[in-house]
Image (cartoon, helix red, strand yellow):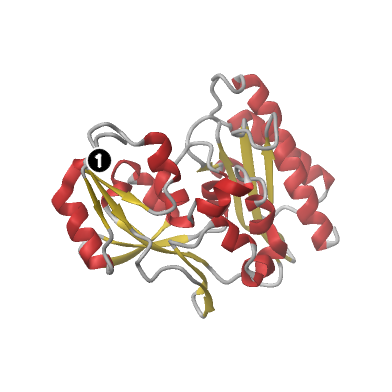
Amino acid sequence: MTSVQTYQRPSSVEEAWSLLDEGGKNAMLIGGGVDVGLFSPPEIHTLIDLTRLPYQSIDLNDNGLVIGAGVTLTEMLESRWVADTLDGVVVTMLRQVASPLLRNAATVGGAVASTHPWSDVITLLLALDASVTRYAGQFETVSLAELLEQRGTIDRAIITEVILPVTGDRTFAGFEKFVRTGFDVGMLNCACRITAEDDGCQEVRIVFGGAPDIARRMEAVERALTGVKLDHAGIEAAAVLAAEVLPARDDVRASAEYRRILAATGVRRCLTRIAQRLGE
């Protein structure tokens, strides 16, 4: 942080983006400040503080649950609308993110923009088909999946909102994380979302993060579950397939082989909880 020479606090997203565009690679956005404190590169000369921007609320409207980018993870945890979303799966995930002190500072916009491979937030939001509104000279709303494909340029725009779409009464989700200690970075995380119909599972999402790459959907498992009843046989087949197709690698946290074991366990646990909610 010794290289920082200028600290800006714009009051509008237009002003913030103008400062970012002008500063180029020497400028960095700051919301909760967690990543800036941990990962600020030496070439950063200008910090652009986003805390005065009007994106600090959580609202429920016809588009779904709209979460301002400046909302902290703790504020999400304490929101009744977030708690009511898919039986509280977002709250379940957030309680496992970092520590209470870090959740008090970290923002949902920062969690998305950071694109950490081990991010629990990104894994679950991807499974929930979240979309993101951003500003780079004009407002644009894109799916989180599309945004992650542009991972190298996310920090060149300003995220203003994260939107969780409305779901039906027969849609359920689960989240599972594997860690060595309570506040440790996870060895693997897993999120599943399913809409149940009379002819079996529909709109299936199976997502893994920290394998150790950025979260991604397991489309082979999703296809295999589509149209299948969520009984013991269906769950076990999905768990076995997840272990087979997970693009796992070794790193300091876990081996690829162990991550595949965790993948099967994560899918099995998530789908079992969803099946219990469905009464199957």
**Picture quarter with the C terminus:** bottom right
The answer to whether any part of residue 206 appears in the image is no
Left/right placement of residue 30 relative to residue 90 reads left
Q: Name which residue lies at 26% across and 63% down.
A: 10
The picture quadrant where one finds residue 229 is bottom right
- Tell me the amino acid under the disc marked 1: Val
Residue 8 in percent (x, y) is at: 25, 56
Residue 225 in percent (x, y) is at: 67, 49
Badge 1 density bin: few <14, some 14–19, many ≥20, Cα 10 Å? some
Q: Name which residue lies at 14% across and 52% down.
A: 22
Q: Name which residue lies at 68% across and 64% down.
A: 86
Left/right placement of residue 61 relative to residue 19 reads right
**Picture quarter with the N terminus:** top left
Residue 55 in percent (x, y) is at: 41, 68
Q: Name which residue lies at 41% across and 44% down.
A: 114
Left/right placement of residue 49 relative to residue 273 reads left
Q: Identify whether 188 is placed above or below 147.
A: above
**Label 1 sits on residue:** 4
Disc 1 is placed on an element classified as loop
Of residues 194 and 160, the one nearer the viewer is 160
Q: Identify whether 139 is placed above or below 29.
A: below
The picture quadrant where one finds residue 128 is bottom right
Left/right placement of residue 258 relative to residue 154 reads right
Q: Say how many tags the image has.
A: 1
The answer to whether any part of residue 106 appears in the image is yes
Residue 100 in percent (x, y) is at: 63, 48
Of residues 82 and 173, the one nearer the viewer is 82
Most extreme residue toward the left is: 22
